[in-house]
Image (cartoon, grey):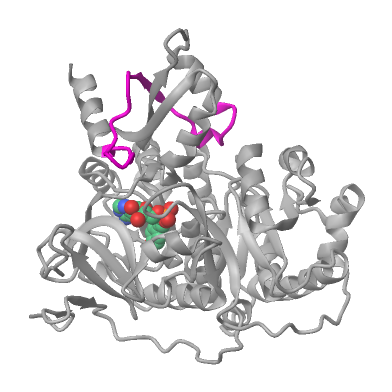
Amino acid sequence: PPFWFSPITGIYSSKFPSIHLPVDPNLDAVSALFSHRHHGDAALVDSLTGFSISHTELQIMVQSMAAGIYHVLGVRQGDVVSLVLPNSVYFPMIFLSLISLGAIVTTMNPSSSLGEIKKQVSECNVGLAFTSAENVDKLSSLEVRVIIVPESYDFDLIRIENPKFYAVMKESFGFVPKPSIKQDDVAAIMYSSGTTGATKGVLLTHRNLIASMELFVRFEATQYEYPGSSNVYLAALPLCHIYGLSLFVMGLLSLGSTIVVMRRFDASDVINVIEKFKITHFPVVPPMLMALTKKAKGVSGEVLKSLKQVSSGAAPLSRKFIEDFLQTLPHVDLIQGYGMTESTAVGTRGFNSEKLGRYSSVGLLAPNMQAKVVDWSSGFFLPPGNRGELWIQGPGVMKGYLNNPKATQMSIVEDSWLRTGDIAYFDEDGYLFIVDRIKEIIKYKGFQIAPADLEAVLVSHPLIIDAAVTAAPNEECGEIPVAFVVRRQEATLSEQDVISYVAAQVAPYRKVRKVVMVSSIPKSPTGKILRKELKRILTKSVSS
Ligand code: 4UU
């Protein structure tokens, strides 16, 4: 057997030498990040205005903002603060300032509905939120103190229009008593539904963030000829999601890369931005890859010549997208990465040096990570070439779910193994392939949607007796949520009524996009929704 697989224990180990992670129990993720010194190169650049700050400036601004947050806002160690923010240069600054104080950050998608924000605010006990102007109304109805983060980087203007934020950012208060932060303290609460049920808070510690930073891109950079600091990354992925957060707020900053931040992904602008800022690396989700490919067809190869690598993750990439991309941009390296919120995004990553055209693989296990492939009927651990549920283990794996020991016990099994809910196999060279998903989540453009969350909204409708949600495949978005609805007998509820009802209560990306009226929901004797059966009904209704 290969050195990276043990037939006795069934454990796959990383093919890479393990990395020495800091052992000091009193280390926080921000100190760990800035222990990697970088100088005058741009760290963060705003794609719209070109405003930029260097790595040195970033460190100073994080210190001074932490002081402002401590003195002006009174935030203390252990306080939970939410970020309901679109991408901006401010996002990493605020995130790092907060966790450097020992505060805990919980991120929310800026398009979240009032109901979604309310649930997270109350579960996490949020007292303060940083948000953009358009979300102020939602938050202020919730007894949360709100700090509005400006869109502008014109500090003279901000001083006049938003003196509060200016004070937090700019005042130099000097001394902040250094909190004693332990690596095992929680730094962030990210939301994910895991393998089943409603969305839950994923507790990520400073240790997890440090592991993610050291084992993810920082390690990946050692695999390339070109050193990290000359790379220019385009940050169009949302920073509120673990994929964007771990890459752009932690890993790449620790590496000294330049990150050009796009407020939101805009297909019509992306070619210009790549050309203007000479982007070398572009991490995407599959729909962005498709949009980029489409746009690239219309321009000459010269325009995108700076681009060296596109990396895709968060959802499966179809063969068709891959082939189309390779044909359109043959000079660009394409890799995939795989991770989860529950693993602080640490999982696998493609490494082009030994890639050999395995574009549909998600790559090799990151250093210090281990995996098992588990046969779900026999419980056996399977050797290379065999499909089963992927379990992973390593320093990226979360502490657990917030206030939910039962869900934690179901997810982290045999002491330390995270059940991914993905069906996968390793090939004979240790490359991982994700082939299916057995967990309930729906992936819409790489975003998670928990069927249980939508089912709760559906059954709150007075004319709906029962409901179940499952995914339907969709070429552009990957998957879309479909609702199966049982109406009251006399009800004249239309499919469109159901769609509108849900849309009014959830973030736009999470809305139900198709409705099937049924007379009953298929359930097991214990009352569990039979999701496989729903999928079968769906395929039947499409083909007939
Ligand atoms: C098929 O989506 C993420 C994390 C994404 C990520 C992390 C590190 C991408 C690239 C990278 O290098 O987190 P969640 O928690 O929102 O969703 C996790 C789930 C996985 O369990 C799997 O089902 O998203 C799916 N997934 C993928 N599926 C993630 N990446 C892939 C992939 N192919 N490349």
Asked if residue 445 can be seen in this view, the reply is: yes
Q: Would residue 447 appear left or right of 79 to someone viewing this image?
A: left
Q: Would residue 247 appear left or right of 523 to someone viewing this image?
A: right
Q: Is the magenta stretch mostly helix, strand or loop?
A: loop
Residue plotted at (65% across, 67% down): 104
Q: In which quarter of the image is residue 338?
A: bottom left
Residue plotted at (57% across, 49% down): 262
- Give the camera-side residue of 218 and 106: 106
Q: In which quarter of the image is the C terminus?
A: top left
Residue plotted at (84% across, 67% down): 74
**Residue 249 placement (x, y as % from top left):** 57, 65
Judged from the image, the quadrant occupied by ligand 1 is: bottom left
Q: Is residue 171 above or below residue 362?
A: below
- Give the camera-side residue of 304 and 30: 30
**Residue 495 placement (x, y as % from top left):** 43, 16
**Residue 445 placement (x, y as % from top left):** 41, 41
